[in-house]
Image (tube, helix red, strand yellow):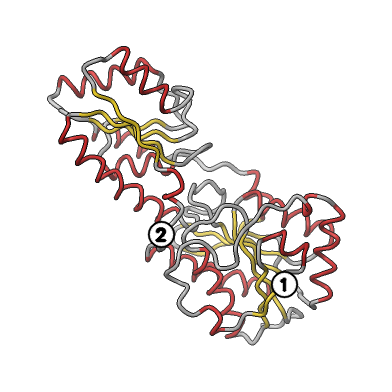
C-alpha cells in the first residue's frame, strides 16, 4: 500500500450514537497497524478550528469499544460554517502535518467534509454514525441497531403496564424525517399501530385500527409514533384526539427521547464500526477521498459523500405490510 499519507486525524461530529467509540478505536488501531500516526480531534469541527488535537496510539483506545457516546466529544461549530473558520481549521491541520481526516457523523458532518474537501483538496473520509439510519449508501448506520434494541426493551416494559391496566400507550421514538426506528421497533415489539413520516395514515384510519383492536378482544394497545409523523401535530395531540373520539380507552404517552442515543453498543454495531474504521483508513492510503464508508449485502463499500448527502433512504414497504398483518 503506497501512500503519501503519514498522519490521519479522526473526530466525531453531530449527535452522538452508540458505536462511535468503536469506530474511533478501529481508526486508531488500523493506523497503528499500518504504522501511520493518528490524531484525535476533540469537539468535532469546533476542535479543528481551535486546534484541539491529541495524538492517539493503540493503547489510547483501550476499553472503549463497549462504551456509548464518544470519548472525543461532539459540538456545534458556527465558526466552521464560515470561510474564515475553515481556513483556520486548514491551517491547524497543516501546522500539525496532518494529511487527511476521518469524520464520524451524519449528513451535516459529511456536508462540512465535502465543502472542506472542495475548498482545499484535503483528503477526507466519512463513517456514518447516527441512530436514525437516514444516510444514503449504507444499509445500516452506526448506532441504529443499538437504538432499536433500546427502544424495544423499553416498549416491552411499557407493554407490561399497558396490559395490567388495560391502557393505550402512545410511545414516541426518534425519527424526525424517517421512520426506520419506529417501523422496526414497532414490528419487533408487536405494536398495534406504527405512525411514520413516510406514510400519513390519517386520524380516521388510526381510530378504525383501534376500534378493530378493541373488537378483536385486545385489552391494551401500543402505538409507536416517530417524532416526525404527520398524522397529528405531536403525540400529545394524538392522545387528546383518541380520548375525545374513543373515550373507552385510558390513554397514556411515553416519549423515549435521548435514552435511545445512549448505552453500550450492540455486538452488531461494534463489529460494523470495526469494519468501517479499517476501510476508512485503507481507502485514504489508497488515494481515495471524499467518500463515505457503508455496508450493503454485508460488504463494506464506498459511496461518494455528495451522493450520501443528496440521496434518500427508502422505508421498507415489505415491513409495513408485515406490520399490518401482525397487528390483526
**Residue at label 1?**
287
Mark 2 crowdedness (10 Å alpha carbons): few <14, some 14-19, many ≥20: some
Against 163, residue 245 (above or below) is: above
Return the disc, 1 or 2, that comes first in the chain's sequence. 2
Asked if residue 148 lies left or right of residue 13, the reply is left
Q: CA distance from mark 1 to mark 2?
A: 36 Å
Sort mark 1 into few (<14), some (14-19) or many (20+) by Cα contacts within 10 Å. Answer: few
Which residue occupies the foreground of this view, 140 or 15?
Answer: 15
Question: Viewer-proximal residue, 109 or 64?
Answer: 64
Extreme-top residue of the structure? 245
Image label count: 2
* Residue 322 at x, y percent in the picture: 29, 37
Up the image or down, 285 lies above or below 103; here it is below
Q: Is residue 155 above or below residue 18?
A: above
Q: Residue at x 33, y 21 (%)?
A: 206
Locate the C terminus by quadrant.
Answer: top left
Q: Observer-nearest residue: 99 or 85?
A: 85
Q: Label 2: which residue?
A: 263
Amino acid at each position: 500500500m503506497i501512500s503519501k499519507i503519514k498522519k490521519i486525524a479522526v473526530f466525531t461530529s453531530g449527535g452522538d450514537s452508540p458505536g462511535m467509540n468503536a469506530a474511533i478505536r478501529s481508526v486508531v488501531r488500523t493506523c497503528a497497524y499500518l504504522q501511520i500516526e493518528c490524531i484525535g480531534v476533540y469537539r468535532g469541527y469546533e476542535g479543528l478550528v481551535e486546534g484541539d488535537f491529541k495524538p492517539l496510539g493503540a493503547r489510547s483506545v483501550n476499553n472503549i469499544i463497549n462504551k456509548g457516546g464518544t470519548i472525543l466529544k461532539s459540538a456545534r461549530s458556527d465558526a466552521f460554517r464560515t470561510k474564515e473558520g475553515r481556513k483556520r481549521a486548514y491551517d491547524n491541520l497543516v501546522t500539525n502535518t496532518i494529511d487527511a481526516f476521518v469524520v464520524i457523523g451524519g449528513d451535516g458532518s459529511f456536508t462540512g467534509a465535502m465543502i472542506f474537501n472542495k475548498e482545499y483538496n484535503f483528503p477526507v473520509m466519512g463513517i456514518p454514525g447516527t441512530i436514525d439510519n437516514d444516510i444514503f449508501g449504507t444499509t445500516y448506520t452506526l448506532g441504529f441497531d443499538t437504538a432499536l434494541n433500546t427502544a424495544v426493551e423499553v416498549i416491552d416494559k411499557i407493554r407490561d403496564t399497558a396490559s395490567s391496566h388495560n391502557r393505550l400507550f402512545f410511545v414516541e421514538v426518534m425519527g424526525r424525517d424517517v421512520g426506520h426506528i419506529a417501523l422496526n421497533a414497532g414490528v419487533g415489539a408487536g405494536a398495534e399501530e406504527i405512525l411514520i413520516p413516510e406514510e400519513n395514515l390519517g386520524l380516521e384510519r388510526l381510530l378504525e385500527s383501534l376500534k378493530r383492536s378493541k373488537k378483536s378482544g385486545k385489552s391494551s394497545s401500543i402505538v409507536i409514533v416517530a417524532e416526525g409523523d404527520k398524522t397529528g401535530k405531536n403525540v400529545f395531540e394524538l392522545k387528546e384526539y383518541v380520548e375525545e373520539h374513543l373515550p373507552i380507552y385510558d390513554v397514556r404517552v411515553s416519549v423515549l427521547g435521548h435514552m435511545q442515543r445512549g448505552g453500550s453498543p450492540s455486538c452488531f454495531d461494534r463489529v460494523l464500526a470495526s469494519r468501517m474504521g479499517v476501510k476508512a483508513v485503507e481507502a485514504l492510503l489508497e488515494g481515495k477521498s471524499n467518500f463515505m464508508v457503508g455496508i450493503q449485502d454485508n460488504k463494506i463499500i464506498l459511496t461518494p459523500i455528495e451522493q450520501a448527502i443528496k440521496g434518500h433512504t427508502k422505508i421498507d414497504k415489505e415491513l409495513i405490510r408485515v406490520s399490518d398483518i401482525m397487528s390483526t
